[in-house]
Amino acid sequence: MKIIVIVSHIILVLLTIILIGDVNAASIEAFPAMLCIQNLQPGSSFNLEEESNFAITIPNQSNTRYLYKVVLKEVANILGGYQRLPNDFIKFVPDSVIVEPWDTGRVNVIVTIPEGDEYYNKNYEAPIQIRKFPVSKKGAPMGVSFQLNVTVDYFFETVNNRDVSNFQGEFEVIPNVALVTDYVLGSDVIQNITIFNNDNKKHTYTLNTYAPEMQDTISIVRDILVSIPGHWIIEDNWVQPETKKFLFLFDKGKNITVGPKDKKEYRIDINVPSDAKLPESVLMPGNIYYVPTFWESIIMVESDTGQKDFVRIKVFPSAN
């Protein structure tokens, strides 16, 4: 099983907060700004530094030594389709680091997913906050009138398992990733997803295609092998059934009602136009180019209660 690490280079590759005074002294940076780690196996641990050679890097671009503390932030706003990673699932090594002037600190991230059916097909978000404190020569934090901090967002997605029957929360969508391999352009392919209503009353669910804001990604898999990332579907007209110029066609409309403690299967017809082409290359920040090898989109499922789950769709075209 390959664990996929996706480093997302958004507009701010290094998240930076600039406050007042000297720019270098009154700023804080952390990299990577975003990570998406896929294919995590329940009952196992993922060591970011060992698996990918990545770590949270914290540059101190000033003439003063600083103490940086790393914590899992308590936030209410989690990205749709994700749930906050529980505190006891994640460990920072070390959880605080003193960085000398013009040096860089490193903090490893270790995530452990418990064993159990309820931990398959899961999408977790970990909002990680890095807090900055001036320190004395002995390394003790000094009193400050304000605190600098920055938050990076790391996402952890567990492996698929269509056979599980034990769920957490109000509802669940299975699988969380649907792969279409060796796809012939212009042909129809069917993918089935299942919506499980774990509540004691019926609910109506709305399905829509979704793509994140335009961003460039690098994928890295276990053993530090480079995996070419996908190309996000962002054109709205690709999901209009009446025009047949679409990627995903919902065969029953976009709303589905599921009774209490019941489930319903939902068919998605995939039809990539025969003249569709992946970009020859995509330019990322840092003047790095990559060639995407598949299309990617997300089917977002939203309950009438506002809760969300999603299925990630990946379509790999045939080489012939």
Image (cartoon, helix red, strand yellow):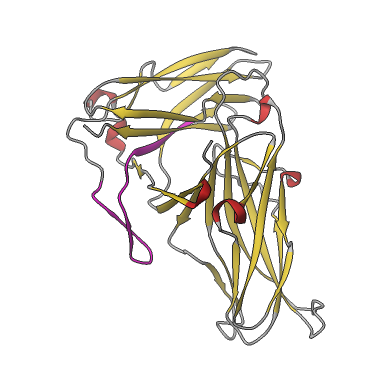
Q: Quadrant of the C terminus?
A: top left
**Is 162 or 196 nearer to us in this picture?**
162
Quadrant of the image containing the N terminus: top right
Count the labels in the image.
0
Q: Position of residue 94 (x, y in %)?
A: 73, 62
**Quadrant in the rendering for residue 207:** top left
Q: Which residues are magenta?
A: 279-300
Q: Is residue 233 left or right of residue 161?
A: left
Residue 154 percent location from the top left of the image: 58, 51
Reply above or below: 134 against 272: below
Above or below, comparing residue 152 to residue 144 in the picture: above
- Asked if residue 5 lies left or right of residue 234, the reply is right
The image quarter containing residue 120 is top right
Between 299 and 120, the one lying in front of the other is: 120
Q: Position of residue 82 (x, y in %)?
A: 58, 39
Location of residue 1 with respect to 144 vertically, above or below: above
Q: Residue at x 35, y 33 (%)?
A: 315
